[in-house]
Image (cartoon, grey):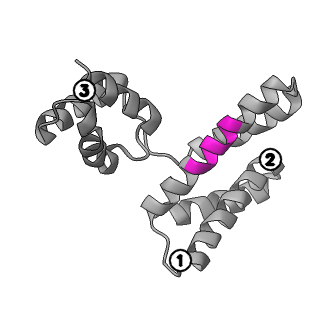
Amino acid sequence: MSLKEQISAEMKQAMRDKDTHKLGTIRLLMAAMKQKEVDERIEITDAHIIAIVEKMIKQRKDSIAQFQLAAREDLVANETQEMKVLELYLPAQLSEEEVMTAVQNAVAESGATGPQDMGKVISLLKPLLAGKADMGKVSGLVKAALQK
């Protein structure tokens, strides 16, 4: 079952369960998926869906930070719930050790010698870790590994 089919099935189940919050979040995701298909005239794949979900989660994290500054706990709770629903569609996250091993392997494979080679290392890691690790944290780990 593709990720798109899974999301569609879960939307139908949320309708049956009358889970309005989950249904609303899934509808936002479905709209973003449809928008990508229409804009780029492509058939959306699981990789595209994962990228969309990651983008939506990042938006939620940014919103949560802003709402916390404004002391709007009601909106923080809403965004947190949406983020939890979206996280269901990401692949299993890698552990810190697995990410560090991948970073070390990529540094060795690319022959990187310093921070100027960060792009080479990231380009090797992105296909391996997309959706499985926070690329912002991966970037920090790569930078730390290259400064040694």
Which comes before the other along the chain, label 2 or label 3?
Answer: 2
The tag earlier along the polypeptide, 1 or 3, is 1
Q: Amino acid at mark 2?
A: His
Q: Distance from label 1 to label 3 (Cα)? A: 37 Å
For the residue carrying disc 1, how many other residues have a C-alpha within 10 Å: few (<14), some (14-19), or many (20+)?
Answer: few
Q: Is residue 8 magenta?
A: no
What whole-number distance in Å separates the C-alpha atoms at marks 2 and 1? 29 Å
List the single residue furthest toward the front. 116
Q: Quadrant of residue 30?
A: bottom right
Q: Say whether residue 1 is visible.
A: no
The crowding category of the residue bearing disc 2, from other C-alpha atoms within 10 Å (few below 14, some 14 to 19, many at least 20), is some
Can residue 125 be seen from the camera position used here?
Answer: yes
Amino acid identity at mark 1: Glu
Classify mark 1: helix, strand or loop: helix
**SS at badge 3:** helix
The Cα atoms of the two marked residues, 2 and 3, are separated by: 44 Å
Eyeballing the image, is 25 above or below 48?
above
Judge whether 15 appears above or below 107 on screen.
Answer: below
> To which residue does mark 3 refer?
146
Q: What is the magenta range?
A: 55-62
Q: Report the mark closest to the observer, 1 or 3.
A: 3
Residue type for callout 3: Leu
Within-10-Å neighbours for mark 3: few <14, some 14–19, many 20+: some
Residue corresponding to mark 1: 40
Q: Label 2: which residue?
A: 21
Q: Dividing the image into 4 quarters, which one contains the C terminus?
A: top left
Q: Residue 28, how many percent across, how many down? A: 72, 58
Q: Residue at x 71, y 42 (%)?
A: 82
Question: Residue 14 location in percent, x, y?
Answer: 74, 54
